[in-house]
Amino acid sequence: MDSAANVTPITPQLGRARLALIKRLADVVCLPSSRVNGFERAMTADLLVEMLREASPSDRARVARRLANLVEMPKRLLRLLLRDDIEVARALLAEDTALSEADLIDCVRQAGPEHRLLIARRRELGELVCEALIEAGEETVVLALLRNTGAVLSGDAVDALVAASQKVVDFIPALLKRVELRPAHAYVLFWWSEPDQRRSILQRFAVSREVLQEAAGDVFPLCAEENWQDPLVRKALQFIERRQRNRAALARSPYASLDEAIGDAQSGMSRDAAREIAFLAGVKPTTAAKIFTDPYGEPIAILCKATGLPRSAVLALWRALRRIETDSTGAMTPALERTLFIFDMMAVDRAQTVLRYWNWSLSSALTPALVRAIREGDDSNLDEYSQPQRAAMLALARDFGR
């Protein structure tokens, strides 16, 4: 006898029976605790999982919609449906569905981009879920996450996003709106931001150090009594103190003042002139190099305002760096106009905060290990570095040919 004769054909009656049983099992899973205990619910869920593996997508989607209102869902059943096609998982990923962070992270890692996009748009997201979404590296998902005010970003997540914004410029305006963004992030982000974004950063994050100066006022004489032997205290006080220019450098300089050094450089900025200006301004040559090679010019305004230079010094530095002052019509170039606007806008103390943070993060944190990490592009172990070291890695990456 032909073996095919023993195979039971699929009939409409069989389809109705399967659908009915799936529905009944889902009903049992959804019963309140007063009607079914935990073991009975788990047993029913296990049976339902086995049936759903062979069910049609429409049947699985129907069950997912049925379960979406449950406060507690059997984990095995929930994860099966969350990892399913997006049309099945959509109901469970809706904003109001009660899902734990573990459930969401599992879905992020095991499902597809459409699942991650829906998760990124959920009303409330914890730090660990956000980190998992960022690790997936999908621009659309990250943008949705950044625009989600209910998502909470950890410091590590913001570090990763600031670094990623070098290549994905669309992240920058969204990052600037995040409440988690700190000066440590913003002053690094500044270097690859557009002029309007830079202005926003300076207006929001260029804070006064008056509170710090009042709090640490009595520490300066104590440190002087110790002859400034403690390098950690010395570095911190250099960030806090009111004076910006380096008096010790002036005593050794061939110039009578910083103003004179800049004026002399108008005929052409040499490497030696740049180093001398850096020392007189109280910053390291690395910081000055970053300022002088910046394509837009706002850092020049910060340097001049922080060191108490007049507005004319901005123009002198502009000429020293061979930058174009006027266009073909004789009008001031937009770049110079923006730079002078920043000079006029900034208060001296706030400009000093920005300049000193740049100097701190771009120079003081550059250990040999950090320089090696920048050159090798090894930013995978950022936890090993301090906050200023992280800033240096991000801001100097381009300068080291990454």
Image (cartoon, rainbow, N blue to C red):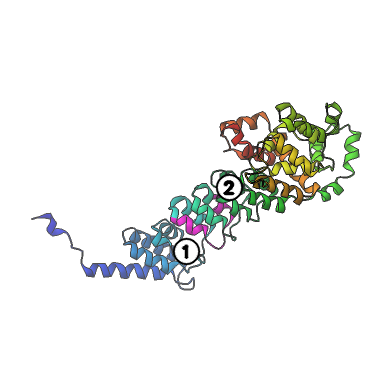
Element at label 2: helix
Lower sequence index among marks 1 and 2: 1
How many C-alpha atoms fall within 10 Å of the one at disc 1: few (<14), some, or many (≥20)?
Answer: some
Is residue 303 visible to us here? no
Does the segment drawn in magenta span residue 120?
Answer: yes
Name the side, left or right, on which 195 lies relative to 72.
right
Element at label 1: loop
Which of discs 1 and 2 lies nearer the camera? The answer is 2
Q: Name the residue: 39% across, 66% down.
A: 63
Dominant secondary structure, magenta: helix
Quadrant (top left/top right/bottom left/bottom right) for the N terminus:
bottom left
The residue to which callout 1 is attached is: 73
The residue to which callout 2 is attached is: 161
Report the label total: 2
Q: Nearer the viewer, residue 86 or 158?
A: 158
How many C-alpha atoms fall within 10 Å of the one at disc 2: few (<14), some, or many (≥20)?
Answer: many
How far is mark 1 from mark 2, CA to CA? 34 Å
Q: Which residues are magenta?
A: 114-132
- Amino acid type, label 2: Leu
Position above or below: 363 against 118: above
Q: Name the residue: 74% across, 49% down.
A: 206
Position above or below: 361 against 344: above
Is residue 68 visible to us here? yes
